[in-house]
Image (spheres, rainbow, N blue to C red):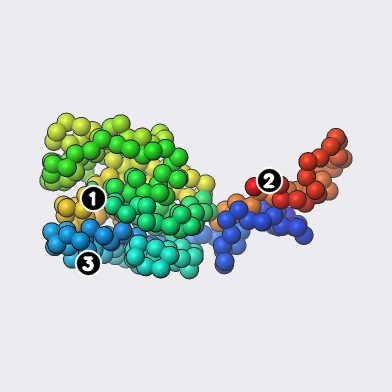
């Protein structure tokens, strides 16, 4: 039978491309009344290794990002780190995450490919993803965008001026025409990303470079936001405007509609919406799963 609008779950259901343990097709993702469940993922390496960084982020960078998000009462925030089993992101966590934030830098290669597959699947189903700063080179960001995500960079503690490109965008609410971060790493163009759906922020740096520092994309049913600021050796995640953007971004990225589980169904002739008869040869057995 056809369940709901467009997902075949007939007598011979196709194997799901990405299977999950408890989620079902057309399960409503979230209602506006529910709290948004956020998982803050942190690589958690620099702050363990370098006392200067631990001094800025005594609870870890993920701890400070989580603290910033908890200022918003409708967010229910947990943290996860690379060092935990399954890199902190087993099915049980991801299936209860509406929005995932991601900060990584020196250990992108230590994130298991199976975890990347799982996060990608959840984004395609509808989970929001907010990728921060050096997360531009994370496996999950490159996987979702399909380009190298390289950029120009310099570590000189220069001033960053973050300009708002669309004052009406939900992620820019509460932000003036621009805000400044006294010391940051420079990221400059060219930024090797597919053209964003929208550029919400554009950064200018003291040394003269510019960068698309707040970009949105849709991937499957999920929303993706990249936000540039957040170099580990500066107190960027204590900055009030940066914290406001993080809160806004999580609200913007919350899932909408219902779950989209990718199943690639083979609909038999007798189940076609209009009567048809077989013409010519077929490559597949009736109800077969096809080549995958
Ligand atoms: Zn950095």
The label nearer to you, 3 versus 2, is 2
Looking at the rendered structure, the secondary structure element under dot 2 is loop
| Horizontal and vertical percent position of residue 107 | 32, 54
Q: Which mark is residue 230?
A: 1
Locate the N terminus and report the quarter of the image it occupies: bottom right
Q: Residues within 10 Å of mark 3 (few under 14, many from 20)?
A: some
| Horizontal and vertical percent position of residue 15 | 66, 56
The label nearer to you, 2 versus 1, is 2
Estimate the spatial distance between the alpha carbons at disc 2 and disc 1, rounded to whole Å: 43 Å
Q: Quadrant of residue 237?
A: bottom left
> As drawn, is 283 to the left or to the right of 3?
right
Pointer 3 residue: 59
* Chain-order first, disc 3 or disc 1: 3
Residue in view at x 77 percent, y 60 percent: 11
| Horizontal and vertical percent position of residue 205 | 17, 36
> As drawn, is 90 to the left or to the right of 76?
right
Estimate the spatial distance between the alpha carbons at disc 3 and disc 1, rounded to whole Å: 15 Å
Residue in view at x 26 percent, y 35 percent: 152
Pointer 2 residue: 291
Seen in the picture, residue 78 relative to 12 is either above or below; the reply is: below
* Chain-order first, disc 3 or disc 2: 3
Q: Viewer-proximal residue, 7 or 120?
A: 120
> As drawn, is 133 to the left or to the right of 252?
left
On whether ligand 1 comes within 8 Å of the CB at mark 1, the answer is: yes
């Amino acid at each position: 039978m056809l369940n709901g609008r467009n997902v075949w779950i007939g007598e011979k259901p196709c194997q799901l491309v990405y299977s999950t343990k408890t989620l079902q097709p057309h399960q409503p993702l979230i209602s506006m009344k529910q709290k948004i469940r956020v998982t803050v993922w942190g690589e958690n390496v620099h702050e363990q290794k370098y006392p200067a960084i631990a001094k800025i982020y005594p609870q870890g960078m993920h701890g400070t990002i989580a603290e910033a998000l908890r200022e918003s009462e409708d967010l229910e925030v947990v943290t996860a780190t690379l060092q935990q089993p399954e890199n902190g992101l087993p099915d049980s966590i991801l299936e209860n995450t509406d929005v995932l934030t991601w900060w990584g830098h020196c250990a992108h290669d230590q994130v298991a490919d199976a975890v990347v597959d799982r996060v990608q699947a959840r984004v395609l189903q509808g989970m929001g993803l907010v990728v921060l700063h050096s997360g531009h080179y994370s496996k999950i960001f490159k996987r979702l965008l399909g380009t190298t995500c390289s950029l120009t960079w310099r570590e000189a503690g220069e001033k960053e001026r973050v300009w708002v490109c669309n004052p009406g965008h939900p992620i820019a609410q509460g932000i003036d025409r621009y805000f400044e971060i006294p010391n940051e790493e420079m990221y400059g163009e060219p930024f090797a990303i597919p053209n964003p759906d929208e550029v919400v922020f554009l950064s200018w740096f003291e040394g003269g470079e510019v960068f698309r520092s707040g970009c949105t994309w849709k991937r499957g049913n999920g929303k993706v936001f990249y936000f540039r600021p957040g170099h580990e050796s500066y107190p960027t995640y204590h900055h009030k405007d940066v914290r406001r953007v993080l809160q806004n971004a999580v609200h913007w990225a919350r899932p909408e509609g219902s779950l989209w589980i990718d199943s690639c169904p083979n609909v038999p002739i007798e189940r076609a919406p209009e009567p048809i008869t077989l013409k010519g040869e077929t490559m597949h057995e009736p109800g077969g799963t096809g080549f995958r």
